Image (spheres, rainbow, N blue to C red):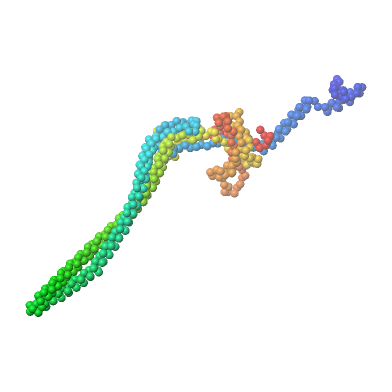
Amino acid sequence: MTEPISPASASSHPEGQPGSDAKPHARFVWTSRNKLYAALAAIIVTLSVIWLFTQDVNPTTDDAQVDGHAIVISSRVPGYVLKMNIDDNTIVNAGDLMIQLDPADYQARVDQARAALGVAKARAASLKITVPFTVGTTTSATQAAEAQVTANTADLDRATTTYDRLSTSELRFAEANVAARKAEMEKAEMDVKRTESLAQQSEISRQQYDTYVAAAQVTKNDWLAAQQRLEAVRQDAVAAKSAEETARASVIRAKAEVRQSRAQELQSQVRRADYESALADVKQAQATLDQALLDLSYTSLCAPMHGVVTRRTVEPGQQFAAGQAMFQLVPLDKIWITANLKETQMAHVRAGQQVRISVDAYDAKTFDGAVDSIASSTGSRQALLPPENATGNFVKVVQRIPVKILVERNRDSADVLRPGMNVEVKIRTTPWFF
């Protein structure tokens, strides 16, 4: 049987040449099928090399879990649970009323604090009016008392001067005048006695004798007048002494009034201090009212954020202390992935790299994410009781380092992902991965 000759070989040889020369060339000509097989083999080899390479550079791990915050909700004030609007797995939005405590006691405290604030404000308003009036009155009284002291002191000086004059110079002058008049009277009486015998013997005339008698009477009258003047001076001195004592008493009384007025001025300062204290009482009462209102607001426990209620321990009618845990609130919109990568996989891992997340519970679902941060130490070092080699026998164990991965937020991730779920992550560290 003759072998067919390909068109290529027929055209490459001139007619008349034997066909035996075309057989060796046909061995080296590839068909389209052979080329396809070769291309597929090259692609398979290339993909195998890339896969082997990216397994080392683009790390993957199934030791990863969904993490999230679990916020413990507790009351800031003690009280009875009056109303409860939540249950386990209830979805709440920020600001929703979850639990209502009995507000009766706290409302009574608010009313009491509001009344105390009113009393404090009334006292402060009263003192605000009376303090300036008291200060002005006491200042005027002090000035008047000091002026009275000055006037009484001047009266005392005049009375003292008058007494000194009457009790010294005038009194001595009056006493000397009495003594002089007495001497004149005694001389006149002796003249009368001496002239009386002469008149009886008619040695002098009766007229001369009468002259001596009249002179004796005049001197006697002068003596009596001098005595009366002396007595008058003495009485004036006594009156001047009394006036001096009265003026001194007036001075003492006026000084006492000055001291009293100054004491009242000090009392007015005390009243001013009372006004400042009343203002402080107003502030304290306002602070007490604000605290009472704040405690009253704490009886309504509202959701601080959007989340899901879990681990509820509160029941209606139950008495709770301040700070006692009631339930936990998990915000599902703030979850992340904690992937524990081997330390040998960390060479090319950096923050910001893209991550593909596969959830064990949903084989067909994948989520996108990004590396947020890398832990500062290995997981074993962060344990409560880190392992320590106390025997000296060391076996090298590959450590794992926690990597925090943020999940791209969308409706599917919010509905599916829950803290504690197992996931598998693949981190893209090369441009040809994914």
Query: Residue 199: percent from the left, percent from the top?
Result: 9, 77
215 lies above or below 141: below
Q: Quadrant of the N terminus?
A: top right
- In the orientation shown, which residue stands out farthest toward the top? 1
Query: Residue 167: percent from the left, percent from the top?
Result: 24, 67
Q: Quadrant of the C terminus?
A: top right
Q: What is the quadrant of residue 18 in the picture? A: top right
User: Can residue 20 be seen at all in this image of the molecule?
Assistant: no
Q: What is the quadrant of residue 343 in the picture? A: top right
Query: Residue 418: percent from the left, percent from the top?
Result: 54, 33
- In the orientation shown, which residue stands out farthest toward the right? 16
Camera-side residue of 119 and 124 = 124
336 lies above or below 172: above
Camera-side residue of 429 and 224 = 224
User: Which residue is pictured at 59% across the width and 32% down the height?
Assistant: 359
User: Which residue is pictured at 13% across the width and 76% down the height?
Assistant: 191
Camera-side residue of 314 and 10 = 314
Q: What is the quadrant of residue 40 in the picture? A: top right
Left or right of 295 in this view: 153: left
User: Which residue is pictured at 55% across the width and 30% down the height?
Assistant: 415
207 lies above or below 79: below
Left or right of 378 in this view: 134: left
Query: Residue 370: percent from the left, percent from the top?
Result: 61, 36
Left or right of 380 in this view: 279: left
> How many labels, in total?
0
User: Can residue 239 be seen at all in this image of the molecule?
Assistant: yes
